[in-house]
Amino acid sequence: MALKPRFSIITITFNAANVIEPTLKSVLSQTYTNYEYLLIDGGSKDDTVAKAKASGIEFAHIVSERDNGLYDAMNKGIALATGDYLCFLNAGDAFHEPDTLQKIVDAIAGESELPHVLYGETAEVDAARNFVRMRRLQAPEKLTWRSFRHGMLVCHQAFYARRDIAPMYDMKYRLSSDVDWCIKVMKRATRLVNVKETVVDYLQDGLSVQRHRESLKERFWIMSRHYGFLPTVARHMWFVLRAIIKR
């Protein structure tokens, strides 16, 4: 029997009226419709929620209230989700094509049970939705929790975790808890599948990009926690040296 997983698509918003429409349209256009859609809004003062309600999408939940930041909102989404896979598609991001979810499902057609993690590639786009480039770090053929020692090889929005193994996000991290979350998911996973498709268009103006230095500091401590302090220091020294050599 063919696997027909249900996706819990979760969009986090706050005053995102100027970027939310491409996200909504990409969800509404999906040819594979076994999904639920949840909008977790931080109490926007603009018409983000009004645009969502007018989009024609049948939402499983729309929550609009003050929260304690991005990862608090994501935790709310996890708590409300009922699907097989968690798919975080933040405001401004979009599914790469109308048949993206169908292609993901087709990629696991030969599986006897749902893999713990599905992952793919990421295209970066600008505010006008123009393609800029493929993400510099490419998804590896084989992914394990140790893979992220070399950086976040898979974009968070292109990483679908099975809900039954997914923890909540650690709130002590404000900008890079997604890195920690993905590693924790992979530590619990035994079957991770590269769907070999570009699955998401990622808008280049996320919170961690805007506060890049602080985000990198958090990532360092997350990697130290999972992979050891001295190995992480040595690895980062190599990253710096490699960057100098490439210049």
Image (tube, helix red, strand yellow):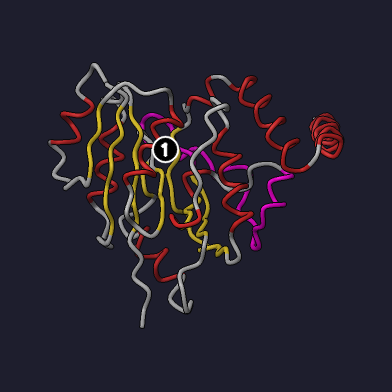
* Residue 240 found in image quarter: top right
Assign a secondary structure to mark 1. helix
For residue 234, above or below residue 82: above
The amino acid type, in three-letter code, at marker 1 is: Asn
Compared to residue 121, the image places residue 102 above or below, namely below
The location of residue 104, given as percent across then percent down, is: 42, 63
Task: Confirm whether the magenta stretch covers residue 132.
Answer: yes
* Left or right: 96, with 161 as reference point: left
- Residue interval drawn in magenta: 124-150
Q: Is residue 41 left or right of residue 123?
A: left
Looking at the image, which is closer to me, 29 or 117? 117
Question: In percent of the image, x 68 and y 46: which residue is there?
Answer: 148
Residue occupying the point 37% across, 49% down: 95
In what quadrant of the picture does the C terminus appear?
top right
- Residue 228 location, x and y as percent? 80, 39
Q: Which residue is mark 1?
A: 75
Give the crowd class for mark 1: few <14, some 14-19, many >=20 residues within 10 Å: some
Q: Above or below — where is 191 with respect to 206?
A: below
The quadrant of the rendering that contains the N terminus is: bottom left
Query: Where does the image place residue 14, in percent across and percent down from the top left?
Result: 33, 24
- Given residues 18 and 12, the one toward you in this image is 12
